[in-house]
Amino acid sequence: MRSALLAALLAVSLAPAFAGAQQIILRGPGPERVAAIIRTTAERQHTLRAGSGDLVLPRDSTIPRNLLVLGRNTYLSSHVQGDVVVVGGDLFLRPGSSIGGRAVAIGGGVYRSFLGTVGGPIESYRDDDYFIRTSSTGYELEYAAKKDKPPLFQLAGLQGLLAPTYDRVVGLSQPVGALVTFGERAVEIQPTVTYRSRLGQFDPGVVLRIAPEKPVRLEADYGRSLRSNETWIYSDLLNSAASLAFGNDTRNYFRAVGGTARLIGHVEKKTVTFEPWIGGRTEEVKPINAAGNVFSFWGRDDLNQGSRPNPLVQPGRITSGLAGAALTYSAGDVSARLSAEGEQSFATPAFTSSFTQLTLNGAIDFPTFRDQRLSIAGHAVVTAGDTVPLARYAYLGRASTLPLLQLLELGGDQLLFLDSEYSIPIKRLALPMIGSPTLIATHYMGTAGVGSLPKLQQEIGLGVSVNLLRAAFVFDASGDLPTIFSVGFSLPR
């Protein structure tokens, strides 16, 4: 049966998405999830880089589509408007790198930088590799099946150390973990212990993954954690850097003991990747204060930054069902992503009511005229319920949301935010080492409230960016708030 399946999959040809492209042919594709990534990347419009030796992509370069690299370690400082997939090597993201889609390494790992951004997921498949051979029409990839099963027990991350985070509430959070694997990665169990420096506590936790490389997988976690509803604003890495450097923690927090389980499907086609899921969550929540005694280089004593109070939540258990989906689209120079999750509560803390909540997050980026581009991003929370638990409130203000407001000034169980950014690169003014400047016009629009949406706050930004550095004026469309001028890093969500 196994040989028949391999024979049926033999010589799966990946037709190039544009004239003149070299064919990528899979022979013995290997795990479905990994093969699907290579297949769809090769079917879409892409730039191919193959050969021997390291591939270095400098800051002043731009790739307006997906990037597929075969057999080369890749050091990326440039801007890639689509996905980056490296087969048979590592992917190193250097300061100044910007990836519009996902970053994937097959047969290697993805190594991030504080000053590099990735719009989509980051995935490393270190145990899956391919033999890469040239052919008359392009390249043939044959799965390099491992003779030995993965070890039953190994340290997770880098010698047991997982990615740390930093915030104004608990300071440093350093997780340490191990990985227990059964079968050929059919089941993965990852126990962890996270040290919270300000609290002096060790938070235990465990992650369970069943069939992680199959089209249908189960992901579950349980433990004591620090939770936030503002993770959409900045990634963990960017939020940690902003908190440590400037005290600009873009999140509110509460403590929780509990877990989440999701059954997730995965469908990957030429232009679309679709992941629907269904699951549930139960957690015992309680508030956590922000004492203002967490170190930061600037803003530590500022009540709007490092010493900003943390909103309280009602203590008690929230149990709910979850259903949602994530969709990504990539065709030529157009990329888009959308995620939606619905939550229906079954149990809530005392003096609160049952609720139904829908959370939407999405973005689209496409070219307009010559090298000019328009990017639109949005986030929305819609909630039905008489007395919604405060642990389900969401907030916006400052950071990458509404620059003229205080940090997370607006909040509630209803939220709407959109920003539209039009960029015009000035190619004729290419600067050595750092690239060309880009003129940027931005329209911010958003509000948040309890029970209903207040009047929309609208702001207009005009500025220039060079690599990750941005200088801009921001105006209040109504004229009620003073104009500000800021210089800082351009850090997309």
Image (cartoon, grey):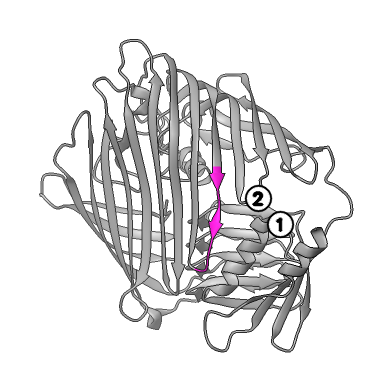
Q: Are marks 2 and 1 in contact (CB under 8 Å)?
A: yes
Identify residue type, mark 2.
Lys
Image quadrant where residue 175 sits: top right
Residue 53: image quadrant is bottom right
What residue do we see at 63% from left, 41% from top?
A: 163
Looking at the picture, tell me which residue is in the foreground, 279 or 112: 279
Task: Tell me the residue that label 1 is attached to.
Answer: 31
Badge 2 or badge 1: first in the primary sequence: 1
Does residue 368 sit above or below 397 in this rendering?
below
Residue at 69% x, 84% y: name it. 138
Residue 128 locus on image (x, y percent): 75, 57
Q: Residue at x 83, y 45 (%)?
A: 150
- The residue tagged 2 is 214
Residue 190 in the image, given as x and y percentages of width and height? 70, 34
Asked whether 270 or 255 is in front, the reply is: 270
Residue 29: give x, y in percent of width and height: 72, 65
**Which quarter of the rendered picture does the N terminus lie within?**
bottom right
The location of residue 486, given as percent across then percent down, is: 31, 53
Viewer-nearest residue: 292 or 12: 12
Region of the chain picked out in magenta, as a range: 264-270
